[in-house]
Amino acid sequence: MDKFNLLECTLRDGGYITGWHFDDEMIKDTVKTLIDAKLDFVEIGYLNNSANQSNMTQFRTIDQISSFIPKDRKDSVILAMADVLQFKPEDLTPYDGKSIDGIRVVFYKHQIEEALVMSRAIKKAGYKLFVQPMVTIDYTVDEYALLAKEIAKLEPYAVSIVDSFGYMLKSDFRQYFKILDNILSPDTVIGFHSHNNMNLAFITAQDILEYETSRRLVIDASLYGMGRGAGNLNTELIANYYNMTLGNKYDTIKILQLISKYIIPIRKGKNWGYSPYMFITGLYHYHPNFACYLLDEVDVSVSEFEKFIQTIPHEMCTKCRKPYVLEMWEKFKQGE
């Protein structure tokens, strides 16, 4: 593995756009092509105890994923994500080299204990452990240091800094990076997962690729930036930037072929990426679904939305459910 690496998460984060409905052949072709394009890590989807359909990137079992992985995975590491609320540790099956190589544990600040239980089970089962604390900037420096010390005991393969709401600056990333860098084993990879609410993802990623550090780093990206709300860092952009600045590694033509074949057709009927509404959620540090859920049901001007978001209690900024958003919108309209 190189010092700087890319993790492709279209089939997982892009699933927020399609309800994780992707044709089985598309899943196989996408995984194989990303491997051929020399992506270092390929995330194939979610582990979910409730999943029971084909043509989806939510998988009930780890074994179910094996049919989507080519025999020759070359140097790529294949991953799945496990949300602590969606997959039970007791449903992990031991690593056998036929399916995924690693599992990313994703959790909010109030779910740390559940995440530690899941993480221990993943290590015991023999998988590479990736720890993904969402909304990293929600932690104070002291809180993050305490979390890092607990995670370090697990000897994870990687820990990611996560800009869930798309407003982290380069200086924010550096602050949290220094905490992890001082606490984690030198062998642990540090990652960055970003969203594009304020169009900062590419800027911060470029800065990361210029870091003077001996530690290995990994940056998440998705095809055409496909992902929830404002979407993610674009794979094609960061892969090309890597090639231009660090040496030719990634096959951007294969990446563009995937975008042309699969993502452009999805884009014609679905929407993601930067918008003034996403900017406002980033500006006020609120979950992007406050915009997504509301715009699904109501025609709201940018000015109206800016006034509305300020009426949401700050303690609810990460607790976003559609009924709550619509209820608060009705209260907002009645109060005008």
Image: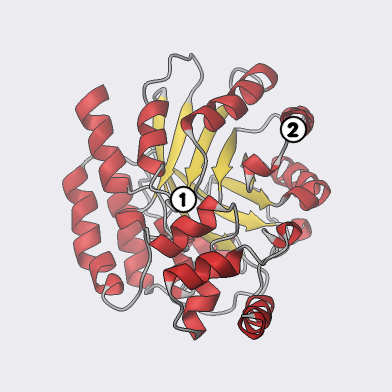
Where residue 81 appears, x then y in whole percent?
A: 58, 54
Secondary structure category for the residue under label 2 = loop
231 versus 149 height, above or below: below
Density class for disc 2 (Cα within 10 Å; few <14, some 14-19, many ≥20) is: some
On the image, numbered disc 2 is attached to which residue?
A: 154
Density class for disc 1 (Cα within 10 Å; few <14, some 14-19, many ≥20) is: many
Where residue 142 appears, x then y in whole percent?
A: 77, 28
- 194 relative position to 131: left or right: left
Q: Amino acid at mark 1?
A: His
Quadrant including the C terminus: bottom right
245 versus 213 height, above or below: below
Q: Nearer the viewer, mark 2 or mark 1?
A: 1
196 versus 41 height, above or below: below
Q: Amino acid at mark 2?
A: Leu
Asked if the residue at tag 1 contacts the one at tag 2, i.e. Cβ–Cβ closer than 8 Å, the answer is no
Q: Is residue 37 visible?
A: no
Between 257 and 54, the residue placed more toward the observer is 257
Secondary structure category for the residue under label 1 = loop
**Residue 145, labelled with which disc?**
none
Where residue 212 appears, x then y in whole percent?
A: 43, 14
On the image, numbered disc 1 is attached to which residue?
A: 195
Q: Earlier in the sequence, mark 2 or mark 1?
A: 2
Between 314 and 62, the residue placed more toward the observer is 314
Where residue 21 appears, x then y in whole percent?
A: 44, 75
Gap between marks 2 and 1, in whole Å?
27 Å
Quadrant including the N terminus: top left
Residue drawn at x 70%, y 20% is 183
- 271 relative position to 20: left or right: left
Image mark count: 2
Residue drawn at x 26%, y 47% is 236
